[in-house]
Amino acid sequence: LPCQTIPETLRDRFSGVSTRIPLLHGEDAIYINFDNAASTPPLHAVQSGVDRFVEYYASVHRGTGFKSQLSTWAYETARAATLRFVDADPAERTCIFVKNSTEAINKLAHRLNLEPDDVILTTVMEHHSNDLPFRAVAETVHIDVCPDGSLDEDDFDRKLTQYSDRVRLVSISGASNVTGFLNPVRRLAAKSHAAGAYFMVDSAQLAPHRTIHIGALDEPDHFDFIALSAHKMYAPYGTGALIGRTDVFSHGDPDLRGGGTVDIVTLDDVVWADTPERDEAGSPNVVGAVALALAIRELTEIGMDVVAQHETELTAYALETLSQVPDVHIFGDTNPTRAHERLGVIPFLLEGKSHFLVSAILGYEFGIGVRAGCFCAHPYLLRLLDVDTEAARRVREKMVAGDRRDIPGLIRISFGLYNTTEEIDRLAQALEAIQRGDYQGRYTQDASSGEYRPEGWAPDFNSYFPLA
Ligand SMILES: Cc1ncc(COP(=O)(O)O)c(C=O)c1O
């Protein structure tokens, strides 16, 4: 399918994609959202489905009225849909609803009952959420990346062998939130299992863009655990999921204790409920779970192959277009013919201009939302930008002193299913204008955040969405 024909039908399925927003010079423009790796707008089907559902909403589990029973049914149906989405067999897998991938990974780190000298293997390219939770519970060892930012599989093999008697878990992102690199997770899973370790795929980035097959436990290349976030899958209602081995979740204490997690409590004893109840303390986010199930239904109807194809075409187009903009330096894989081997997440710099400044001008003067900085992946950014230890130490010192002006970083665009090639053209034109100095505002940098703001103007958010 040629790129232009897909978005017309796909774009109509999303809320908020035609919203006009104010620009610095008094005009307005239809907002371009190129920050989908951070969070996505809702599909109409999700938004309207949630609106219908709240008419029936009541607290789940043990409520005896019709609404409570319907809500319980909807919550458990959403759980089954989430398992089906990753092709998980409910006989051996459980879906635990959490609020996002970060909570999912923290929960797993706790639920593995690790000892301090157990080893978790993760990588230099991870989002902090797939790194810091492990550092708190075990020795965490980082597999290196190659100079272009792709995983160094030789280092993976070396470290897996070196720590083989102590590695309990290998946890790797299915796709990088910085470079969009797809990791060879099936192959890495098989190697990890051969070394006696569990294998977890941080699927925060992968799940919205590719089919995931978790695999049966007797398949050598299955995934033991998966984490995902619904707000990156066009269902921004506060839910995520940890999907994994029921046999593991069936042992050990819950990380959070309280209502819903128990079978019976006496003053001196507690019998924990079976998973997933044991792992979902307190009243769950039923609306969020329903929203995720609605998004899954819509994505499945569209077809994950169509999703992947459209985003591949956008990525190839963007790589080609941006490479023709003077002084744009793209990081990671820059080859458009390999766009099908990565996600539509493209980090770049405009030579000679601060990433903070360029991203501010794009937002204030061109209505284009991007992200700038380190994308919660500091070690990876330092590697991509080739910042040596001494320079990193100086930056750290200034940051600790409250001055973030010189933080190294990149600008990132990341595509969603509703983005179009026309939007990429608008970005390219904007970058060319910025590079020519063809922008109107005078920008000053805020030392504590590093962000640039135009002098003498700030949007009045309350007039767009009255809340105050
Ligand atoms: C690869 C990766 N893992 C984990 C996370 C954390 O996701 P969340 O913020 O939804 O917890 C993100 C968020 O951007 C991510 O990109």
Image (cartoon, rainbow, N blue to C red):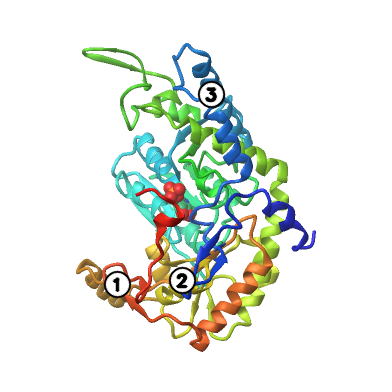
| Marks 1 and 2, the one that precedes in the sequence | 2
Which is more foreground, mark 1 or mark 3? 3
| Marks 3 and 2, the one that precedes in the sequence | 3
> Which residue is pictured at 49% across the width and 63% down the height?
178
Amino acid type for the residue under numbered disc 1: Asp
Residue 217 in the image: x percent, y percent?
Answer: 58, 34
Which of 122/229 is in front? Answer: 229
> Which residue is pictured at 52% across the width and 23% down the height?
71
Q: Which residue is mark 3?
A: 56
Which is more foreground, mark 1 or mark 2? 2
Describe residue 136's horizontal placement relative to residue 99 as left or right: left
Describe residue 64's horizontal placement relative to residue 184 as left or right: left
Q: Label 3: how many residues lie within 10 Å, few (<14), some (14-19) or many (20+)?
A: few
Amino acid type for the residue under numbered disc 3: Tyr
The answer to whether the residue labelled 1 contacts the one labelled 2, judged by CB atoms less than 8 Å apart, is no
| Marks 1 and 3, the one that precedes in the sequence | 3
Disc number for residue 446: 1
Disc number for residue 271: none
> Which residue is pictured at 53% across the width and 71% down the height?
27
Q: Label 1: how many residues lie within 10 Å, few (<14), some (14-19) or many (20+)?
A: few
Amino acid type for the residue under numbered disc 2: Tyr
Q: Which residue is mark 2?
A: 364
Residue 18 in the image: x percent, y percent?
Answer: 61, 58
Quadrant assignment, res 380: bottom left
Decide: is 36 above or below 94.
below
Res. 219 visible in picture: no
Residue 38 in the image: x percent, y percent?
Answer: 48, 56
Describe residue 127's horizontal placement relative to residue 116 as left or right: right
> Which residue is pictured at 58% across the width and 26% down the height?
77
